[in-house]
Image (cartoon, grey):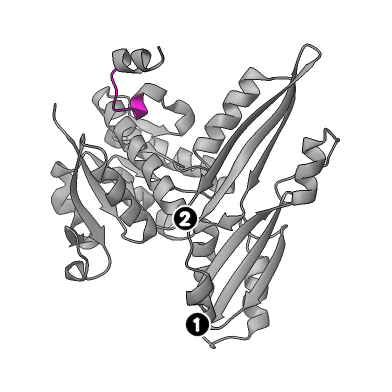
Amino acid sequence: MSKINVGIVGYGNLGQGVETSLSYNDDFNLVGVFTRRDPKSLNTKAYHVDDILDFKENIDVLILCGGSKNDIPETREFYSTHFSTVDCYDNHQDLLNHYNILDKITKDNENVSIIGTGWDPGVFSVQKLYSESFLPNGESYTFYGPGLSQGHSDAVRQVNGVKYGAQYTLPNDHLVKEIEDGKDVNYTKESAHIRDVYIVSDNSRNDEDIKNDIINMPDYFKGYETNVYFISEDEFKENHQNLNHGGYVLRRGFTNNNQATYKIELNLDSNPEFTASVAVASARAAYRFLKDKNFGAKSLFDVPPSYLSRLTTEEMIQSLL
């Protein structure tokens, strides 16, 4: 059986996580990493991103590991024109627009793009859909953290004047307890979470101006309780290098008059490595859609579970016995 030839765009935490995940999946072949940095500075098979079209005929699926704030919106049209892609785009408010843009381009060019892979959007989105399908009479709640958010940290680092930045998402523990106690609550994603931001300034701007840019950033911080802390570079490097994250989807519903609770929880030592693993499984699905000539944009809602797995149908059924 031929292997799926994959390229990686970007070599930060997520790109390195994809490379590691590929090594655990023997049906993939890594063609190379494509980066804006000097390829010779990386201890891997790397090429400059400007040369990526030279590899167009050798790559089945391109996994995009750039940030959601700027990288993916600025490059999505180019990559989806020339390649089938997988991304971890996590701007919830722009996902439908992102889908519509890529759906037209990939259908026009007979490519496939699987969008929003990772755990939220991604795994949590699918589990929420399952829970609402199984328990139509009920309410759903999603809580994130405590842990480091890759997308929000990347957004913070794009703010003018920020040298280093990390953003932690914390669940509103009081609201969680009220839900678990069966109380009626006024749940919104904004009321359910607190955002703590730690910043090392490059001293080019006033701290208050940097803070205002962060707390008023649409789609990321505006509307949330957000705390911004300015710290030293030494403190940042000592205390803010962890990549852990997690959260859970909770649905409280009823079957007739009987209560049922559906809950899936993730506790991750490495947020980017788990996100990368979902992206790699999604690349397998993208390849299968491509072979089926089922072109266009897909979310994980559109992906059959069997398309994500290395196992055959017979092996999957046997594993349940």
Residues packed near mark 1 inside 10 Å, few (<14), some (14 to 19) or many (20 plus): few
Residue 320 sits in quarter: top left
Dots 1 and 2: beta carbons under 8 Å?
no
Residue type indicated by callout 2: Ser
**Percent of width and height locating residue 312:** 28, 18
* Residue drawn at 29 percent across, 54 percent down: 9
Q: Which residue is mark 2?
A: 68
Front residue of this view, candidates 4 and 204 = 4
Q: Residue at x 31, y 45 (%)?
A: 21
Residue that lies at the very extreme toward the front in this rendered image: 321
Mark 1 sits on what residue? 234
Label 1 is placed on what type of residue?
Answer: Asp
Front-lying residue, 94 or 180: 180
As drawn, is 257 to the left or to the right of 217? right
Q: Is residue 216 above or below residue 235?
A: above
In the picture shown, does residue 305 fall above or below 116? above
SS at circle 1? helix
